[in-house]
Image (spheres, rainbow, N blue to C red):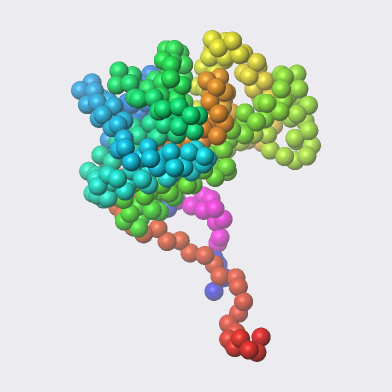
Amino acid sequence: MSEGVKINRGLKGVYFERSGVSDIDGAAGELSYRGYSIHDLATKSTFEEVSYLLIHGELPTADQLAAFDRDLRAARDLPGGVFDVIRATADGHPMDVLRTAVSALAALDPRAKATSREAFLENGTRLIAQLPVLVAAHHAIRSGRDPVAPDPSLGHAANWLWMLKGEKPSDHATRLADVDLILHAEHGANASSFAARVTVGTEADLHGAVVTALSTLAGPAHGGAAEDVMKMVHEIGHPENAAAYVKAKRAAREAVTGFGHRVYRAEDPRARHMRDGVEALGREMGQPEWFEILQAVVEAMKPYSRHGLNVNVDFYSGVVYQLHGIPMDLYVPIFAIGRAPGWVIQCVEQLDRNILIRPLTLYEGPEPRAYVPLQDR
C-alpha cells in the first residue's frame, strides 16, 4: 500500500488551493498583496487601505476608504459581557485571553453565526477593529486599571497605541506601528491561515476560524519570533558582545533568532521597512542601544547569508514593542492584530469554493492481528 507514496512532511512544497491574495517569491525575496509590492504598500499606504485591498481585491476610492474606516471605528465598541470574561480570565496569558474573548464575542453577538459571504465580510471587518480593543482592555485590567476607551478621532494604529498606553503617540510612532501592521497583514498559507481555512472547510463560522487561527499563532514556532529576538537582545546586552554570541550559537549548531524563514531564502522583503523606523524611533525615545545590538548581530551573521540565513520581519518588530514599553507576552497578540485582515480574506476565499480539507496519513503501524481478550493478556 505504501509503494510509490511520497510523504511531504509539514505539507512542504504542496499546493492545496489557488489564491488571489498574496504572492510570495521566496528565492527572490519578494512579496505582494493583490499584485501590489509590499515595498509600495509599506511606504505609501495605511493599514486601513491595505485591509480594504486584501478583503475587497482592489485599492479603495476615497469614498470607499472613508466608509470602510467609519465601519472600523464604529466596531470598536464591545458588548459589556466581553469585559466580564476578560476580568474572569485576567491572570491568563494574553493569547489565551484573546482567544477566549473572541469566543465570547461569538456567543454574545448573534451576527457571528452567519456563514454567508456577506456575513464573513461584515464580521471580518468587526474583528479587525475589535482585536486591538480586546488586547488593550486585557492589559489594562490585569494591570489594575480600567480599559481606555477607544478614541474615534484616531486611526487604527494610533488608537491601538492610545488604548494600550493611555497616551497619544507621536506621528512617527504611529506610522511605524502602522507599517508593522501592514507587513504582518497577510502571508499566504502560513500555519494560522491554513488552520483557519481548515475550520471554514467544515462550514464553521468566521469567529470559530479566527479562534483556530489564534490558537495556532500562539505556538512559538509560528508567532514567537519577535519575543525570542528581544530575549536574545537582552541576553547579548551590548553591541560588542554580539559577535561572540553568534559564534557560540553557531558552534553549538543552534539557531540565531530572527534569521531564516520557512519561505524566504533571500532577505525577508518586509524587514527593511522596520529597520530604518526602529533606528529613528530608538533615537526619538533616547534608547538607540537596542538597534545597535541588532545591527551588530546582523554584521556577525553576514557570513551565513549564503545559506539562506537572512533577517526576517520579526527581527526588528520586537524592538518597536520594547521601545513602547510593551511587555513581551503581548508581542504575539500584536502579530494577531496585524494578521487579522489576512485571516479574514483567507477564510472568504475558502468559503467561495469551499471543500472539506482532509489530507491522508500513510499507515505504518502493526500488521493485522487477532484481538486478545482482556483475561488472556
Q: Residue, x 56% and y 19% (percent of image)?
A: 323
Number of numbered markers: 0
Is 13 in the magenta? yes
Pinpoint residue 241: horizontal percent, then vertical percent. Answer: 76, 22
Q: Does residue 103 lie above or below 176 as drawn?
A: below
Pinpoint residue 321: horizontal percent, then vertical percent. Answer: 53, 24
Q: Does residue 354 lie above or below 317 as drawn?
A: below
Question: Does residue 325 appear to the left or right of 43 in the view shown?
Answer: right
Q: Residue, x 78% and y 33% (percent of image)?
A: 248
Q: Does residue 347 lie above or below 31 as drawn?
A: below
Taking depth in this image into account, of 29 and 291 the one nearest to the observer is: 291
Quadrant position of residue 252 = top right
Residue 26 is at least partly visible in this image: no
Q: Residue, x 35% and y 52% (percent of image)?
A: 200
Taking depth in this image into account, of 130 and 275 the one nearest to the observer is: 130
The part of the chain drawn in magenta is 6-15
Q: Main secondary structure of the magenta part?
A: loop
Pinpoint residue 132: horizontal percent, then vertical percent. Answer: 40, 31
Is 10 in the magenta? yes
Q: Residue, x 27% and y 50% (percent of image)?
A: 113
